[in-house]
Image (tube, helix red, strand yellow):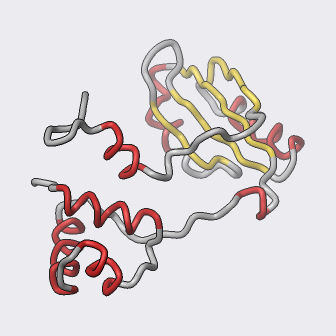
């Protein structure tokens, strides 16, 4: 799989606005609509482009409390806890991590009372040894612009930096 500068430009346009018309993409890239279609199809088949989505402001939905939790669990319970974390209320993201802790969990809830209930749910999972929590005060940057970041980090004419 090879991604060239035109693919990155296409992905950047879609990342900025997934509803952008293919005609406009073609015009901005200086290619035909058929080329845009074929590139999008290839990027989708290669697994680079996973779908089209919207970006929602959680606070406008009433999710004003954001908490991050680090979880340490008993090794024999990791698989079971992995499955349970997918089902818990107000858990928006979960990462399995290295180091002293096993999971990093992002909780987004309407109130800190609801967030505290979500933390209680984490602590009550069988096999959980420790949960350390951190309250987010404000969002400085999120990961919603992956392509834009990749382009900025990538040396011109070469592969992305490791």
Residue 73 in the image: x percent, y percent? Answer: 55, 22
Q: Nearer the viewer, residue 36 or 125?
A: 36
Give residue 7's quadrant in the image: bottom left
Give residue 9's quadrant in the image: bottom left
Q: Quadrant of the N terminus?
A: bottom left
Q: Nearer the viewer, residue 113 or 53?
A: 53
Q: Is residue 90 above or below residue 11?
A: above
Q: Is residue 118 above or below residue 18?
A: above
Q: Nearer the viewer, residue 142 or 70?
A: 142
Q: Nearer the viewer, residue 161 or 27?
A: 27
Q: Give the residue at x 66% y 18%.
A: 130
Q: Is residue 30 above or below residue 102?
A: below
Q: Quadrant of the C terminus?
A: top left
Q: Is residue 144 left or right of residue 40?
A: right
Q: Give the residue at x 14% y 42%.
A: 157
Q: Is residue 35 left or right of residue 88?
A: left
Q: How many marks?
A: 0
Residue 61 in the image: x percent, y percent? Answer: 77, 64
Q: Is residue 40 left or right of residue 120?
A: left
Give residue 49's quadrant in the image: bottom left
Q: Give the residue at x 33% y 64%.
A: 50
Q: Is residue 84 left or right of residue 89?
A: left
Q: Give the residue at x 21% y 76%.
A: 30
């Amino acid at each position: 799989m090879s991604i060239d500068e035109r693919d990155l430009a296409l992905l950047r346009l879609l990342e900025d606005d997934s509803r952008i018309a293919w005609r406009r993409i073609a015009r901005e890239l200086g290619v035909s609509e058929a080329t845009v279609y074929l590139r999008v199809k290839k990027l989708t088949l290669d697994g680079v482009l996973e779908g089209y989505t919207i970006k929602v402001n959680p606070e406008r939905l009433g999710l004003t409390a954001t908490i991050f939790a680090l979880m340490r669990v008993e090794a024999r319970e990791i698989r079971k806890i992995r499955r349970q974390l997918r089902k818990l209320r107000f858990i928006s993201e979960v990462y399995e991590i290295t180091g002293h802790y096993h999971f990093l969990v992002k909780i987004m809830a309407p109130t800190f009372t609801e967030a505290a209930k979500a933390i209680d749910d984490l602590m009550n999972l069988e096999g959980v040894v420790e949960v350390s929590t951190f309250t987010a005060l404000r969002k400085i940057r999120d990961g919603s612009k992956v392509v834009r970041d990749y382009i900025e980090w990538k040396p011109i004419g070469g592969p992305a930096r490791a």
